Amino acid sequence: MAADRLRERTLSVTTLAADEFHAPSLDDFFPPSVLIHAGPFELDRLMLIRLLMSVLVAAFFVIAMRSPRLVPRGMQNAAELALDFVRINIAEEILGKAMDELAPPVRGMFEAIREACKAKGDELKIKPADVQLTRREIRETTAWSDWQVRMYCQKLVEMEYLFAVQAMNGKPAVYQLARDEESRTNTLRGLTSIDELKKRLTSATKEKAANVG
């Protein structure tokens, strides 16, 4: 008996919905105007909603970016994350990458890493491109969160601004500049440098001369 009542109720709801359903027409997409009822500036409710949302979005970004910082916090952080999401996950996926490859937060991360490599290179008397930084060192240098460091470093690796050197024995990966700023050339990972080849050639020549003598 309960099953029959449920079946009758389901059929009645389906029938009622079928009787009341009307397919949308063009009039639903072009509602009557509510302001400026004639001319090219005619405004309907849909256009008013678009204008209102545009004003709200513009006001949010004006407030968020009124005093920008190198390390974003609060509303600035949310605004930059929103811009980064729209740029990477929407604009680049649909329209392709623009000439300016790096979004502002990713650019800020790269500049901070490059300055840290220069400072550590001067300290160790090596080239900045030979310096390796862990995520912990990058966090301490930039004061950014671990999530930001992971996401932006991954983006820089994908765009070939950084190399990710996978450490062995379970140690975390380290990052290295993919470009030698002094010579303005890309570093060739896995290949022996010209200076090292010259040293090896000189050493081999001396050993050969010693053996002949």
Image: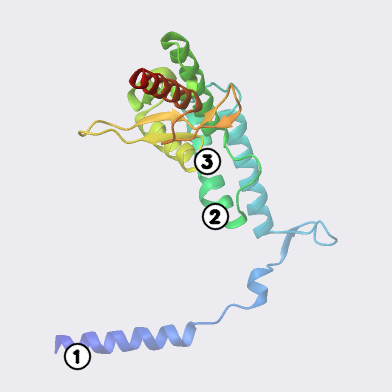
Front of the two marks 2 and 1: 2
- The quarter of the image holding the N terminus is bottom left
Quarter-of-image position of residue 59: top right
Circle 3: residue type: Asp
Q: Secondary structure at mark 1?
A: helix
Q: Would residue 147 be seen by someone viewing this image from the given angle?
A: yes
Give residue 4's mark. Answer: 1
Sequence-first tag of 3 and 2: 3
Mark sitting earlier along the chain (2/1): 1
Residue type at the position of mark 1: Asp
Label drawn at residue 84: 3
Q: Nearer the viewer, mark 1 or mark 3?
A: 3
**Could you tell me residue 96's position as x and y percent?**
60, 53
Could you say where residue 87 lies in the image, as x and y percent from the top left?
Answer: 56, 45
In the image, 173: left or right of 104? left
Query: What's the residue type where badge 2 is placed?
Result: Glu
Residue farthest toward the left in the current orientation of the protein:
1
Q: Position of residue 7 (x, y in %)?
A: 24, 88
Task: Please name the residue shown 51% across and 23% down the image.
Answer: 114
Residue at the image position 64 percent from the left and 46 percent from the top? 98
User: Which SS class for mark 2?
Assistant: helix
Q: Secondary structure at mark 3?
A: helix
Residue 93 marker: 2
Q: Identify which residue, 120 or 3, lies in the foreground.
A: 120
Q: What is the crowding at mark 2: few (fewer than 14 residues within 10 Å), some, or many (at least 20)?
A: few
Q: Residue furthest top?
A: 123
Crowding near the residue tagged with mark 3, few <14, some 14–19, many ≥20 C-alpha atoms within 10 Å: some
Q: Is residue 153 left or right of residue 93?
A: left
Considering depth in this image, is 28 or 8 the residue closer to the camera? 28
The span from disc 3 to disc 2 (Cα, nearest Å) is 12 Å
Sequence-first disc among 1 and 3: 1
Residue 155 pos. (x, y %): 47, 40
